[in-house]
Amino acid sequence: TVRNRADYPQAWPHLELTLTDAGDTPVIRRVLTPAEWVPSGELKANMPARATIPVRVAFSLEGALPTGYRVYVFYP
């Protein structure tokens, strides 16, 4: 879930997803642009004020066995 806690609309952020091993060492890292995670039709405008947006991104892994993850929201 991504939240805009501001009282005004903001640009859609990028998301960094890092999958980690049991020692919290990064195994795989990927940056998702707003076009890859913002629900269809909503990208035309800014993220609404006080909005809560659910995020679902399907992916598959081959050969990696992560046990944890980190997600960072950022503006490049």
Image (tube, grey):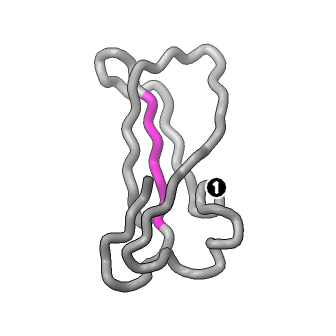
Give the answer, above or below, for where 73 lies relative to 4. above
Q: Nearer the viewer, residue 42 or 27?
A: 42
Query: In percent of the image, x 39 and y 25: which residue is there?
Result: 68
In the displayed structure image, the side of residue 25 where residue 33 appears, left or right: right
User: Quick one: SS at disc 1?
Assistant: helix
Residue depicted at x 65% and y 79%: 44
How many discs appear?
A: 1
Q: Position of residue 40 (x, y in %)?
A: 70, 65
Q: Residue at x 56, y 52 (%)?
A: 32
User: Would you name the residue on which mark 1 appears?
Assistant: 36
Which segment is the magenta one? 13-19
Q: Is residue 11 magenta?
A: no
Left or right of 61, for residue 70: left
Q: Quadrant of the C terminus?
A: bottom left
Q: Is residue 72 above or below residue 6?
A: above
Res 37 quadrant in image: bottom right
